[in-house]
């Protein structure tokens, strides 16, 4: 047997109780040995892991890959290459493509494009309603049969409570997990967090109640139907409390927070910088700290909420610019910034970007344990991050002028080295 050896790296995987400096041997796509040399075989390739960290590959629970339909913003090839740069091995692609991911044919197209690109494994989220219009149920069962790990309506509204109830009942009947965003669109007619900064700048704000009122409705219906529920992209401290109480009451619910909401607040909008026009909006410092505390307590996953845009999409006045950040190129450096500042624990970061997401979408056998398929990333935390050249086609990164650190030295997806 011929092995790939990663030598002397710090292996960190809290799900498997691993935090040690050790050699790791990979062959036939799987981890053959950790901390000891296999009895037989020879080393075919060797990678120096000294002063580097080996983590299970990052899993993203929500990204916009632009393809099919929005080629001016990006493609599956460009965006998965950018994701690989930050250590992502698996990406849940949101269904707001063109055409919408509401048929097995579109699911197959996305899977084929991702396989051709050869970077991260893309797991398409199927549309919960036809055309994401929120009125008629999509063919939910056929979408899961085609390979969708869950169904989502992205941030598109579901018409009314009756349709939402039907979606949940159908999903519960067939054991389908739903990804829902808590967003009352009738209360979300604004472009940033409703607070002193919005008032000072004369911009229309979106209060946290646009999220919490919708979240309350979703949680009550989840309790009634017993659906497997994941809340995508929460942004407020009140939502954290509501989710914790719901779990204590026996509701089967998980949730994620976009990385941007852990790094930035509404004050970043000062100067009308349209790069910070995002959904969900960036909220107050108290919200940011509460979200970070929930991540450190193991209550939330971290998603990228990656949404690439061409230059023209962000050149409009702040309120008219298209919302979203291109996050894949800078996801790892921004996360390491939080870790270096002592705001985010290493173990919590791994749990939030691998263990919780894997549990949500049902991925098994991917951690740093002997016999598992090898999906992992080797990180050099000391090397400066070069963001002058982006892999994503989107130019709308939030940290172009920041001095950040963190570089992926090697990336393996299901045993294959892609970087």
Image (cartoon, grey):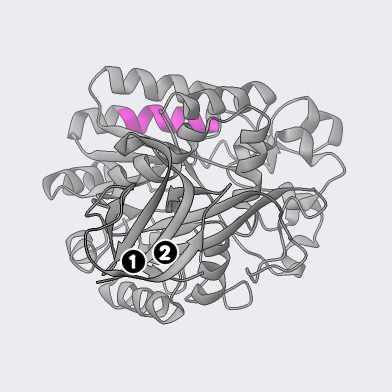
Asked if the residue under mark 2 is in contact with the one under mark 1, i.e. CB atoms within 8 Å, the reply is yes
Q: Which residues are magenta?
A: 210-219
Position of the N terminus by quadrant: bottom left
> In the displayed structure, does residue 278 sit left or right of residue 198?
left
Res 330 quadrant in image: bottom right
310 relative to 170, above or below: below
Instruction: Mark yes or no: residue 101 visible.
Output: no
Q: Secondary structure at mark 1?
A: loop
The residue lying at 60 percent from left, 42 percent from top is 335
Closer to us: 106 or 372? 372
> Magenta stretch containing residue 213, yes or no?
yes
Per the image, is 41 magenta?
A: no
Q: Secondary structure at mark 2?
A: strand
What residue sits right under mark 2 in the picture?
412
Q: Position of residue 356 (x, y in %)?
A: 35, 40
The residue carrying pointer 2 sits among few (fewer than 14), some (14 to 19) or many (20 or more) residues within 10 Å by Cα, namely many
Residue 106 visible from this viewpoint: yes
Residue shown at 18% from the left, 34% from the top: 226
Q: Is residue 365 above or below residue 67?
A: above
User: Looking at the rendered structure, which numbered label has been put on residue 415?
Assistant: 1
On the image, the x and y values in percent for residue 102 come to: 32, 67
Residue at screen point 73% across, 34% down: 266
Residue, x 69% and y 67% (percent of image)? 390
**What main secondary structure does the magenta stretch of the protein show?**
helix
């Amino acid at each position: 047997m011929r092995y790939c050896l990663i030598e002397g790296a710090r292996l960190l995987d809290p799900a498997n109780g691993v935090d040690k400096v050790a050699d790791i041997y990979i062959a036939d796509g799987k981890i053959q040995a950790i901390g000891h040399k296999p009895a037989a075989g020879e080393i075919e390739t060797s990678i120096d892991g000294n002063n580097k960290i080996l983590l299970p590959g990052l899993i993203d629970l929500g990204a916009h890959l632009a393809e099919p339909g929005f080629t001016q913003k990006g493609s599956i090839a460009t965006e998965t290459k950018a994701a690989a740069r930050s250590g992502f091995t698996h990406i849940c692609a949101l269904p707001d493509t063109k055409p919408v991911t509401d048929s097995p044919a579109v699911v197959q197209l996305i899977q084929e494009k991702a396989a051709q690109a050869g970077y991260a494994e893309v797991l398409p989220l199927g549309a919960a309603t036809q055309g994401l219009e929120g009125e008629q149920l999509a063919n939910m069962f056929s979408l899961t049969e085609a390979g969708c790990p869950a169904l989502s309506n992205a941030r598109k509204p579901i018409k009314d409570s009756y349709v939402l109830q039907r979606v949940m009942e159908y999903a519960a009947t067939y054991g389908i997990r739903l990804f829902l965003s808590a967003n009352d669109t009738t209360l979300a007619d604004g472009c940033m967090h409703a607070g002193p900064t919005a008032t000072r700048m004369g911009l229309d704000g979106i209060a946290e109640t646009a999220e919490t009122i919708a979240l309350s409705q979703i949680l009550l219906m989840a309790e009634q139907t017993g659906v497997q529920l994941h809340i995508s992209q929460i942004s407020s401290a009140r939502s954290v409390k509501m989710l914790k109480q719901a779990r204590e009451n026996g509701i089967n619910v998980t949730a994620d927070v976009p990385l941007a909401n852990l790094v930035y607040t509404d004050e970043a909008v000062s100067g009308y910088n349209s790069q910070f026009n995002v959904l969900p909006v960036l909220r107050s410092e108290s919200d940011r700290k509460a979200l970070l505390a929930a991540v450190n307590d193991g209550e939330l996953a971290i998603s990228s909420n990656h949404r690439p845009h061409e230059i023209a999409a962000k050149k409009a006045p702040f309120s008219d610019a298209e919302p979203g950040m291109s996050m894949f190129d800078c996801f790892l450096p921004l996360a390491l910034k939080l870790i270096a500042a002592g705001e985010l624990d290493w173990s919590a970061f791994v749990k939030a970007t691998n263990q919780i997401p894997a549990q949500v979408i049902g991925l098994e056998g991917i951690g740093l344990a002997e016999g598992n398929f090898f999906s992992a990333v080797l990180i050099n935390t000391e090397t400066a991050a070069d963001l002058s050249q982006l892999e994503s086609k989107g130019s709308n990164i939030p940290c172009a002028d920041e001095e950040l650190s963190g570089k992926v030295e090697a990336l393996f997806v299901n045993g294959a080295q892609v970087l």
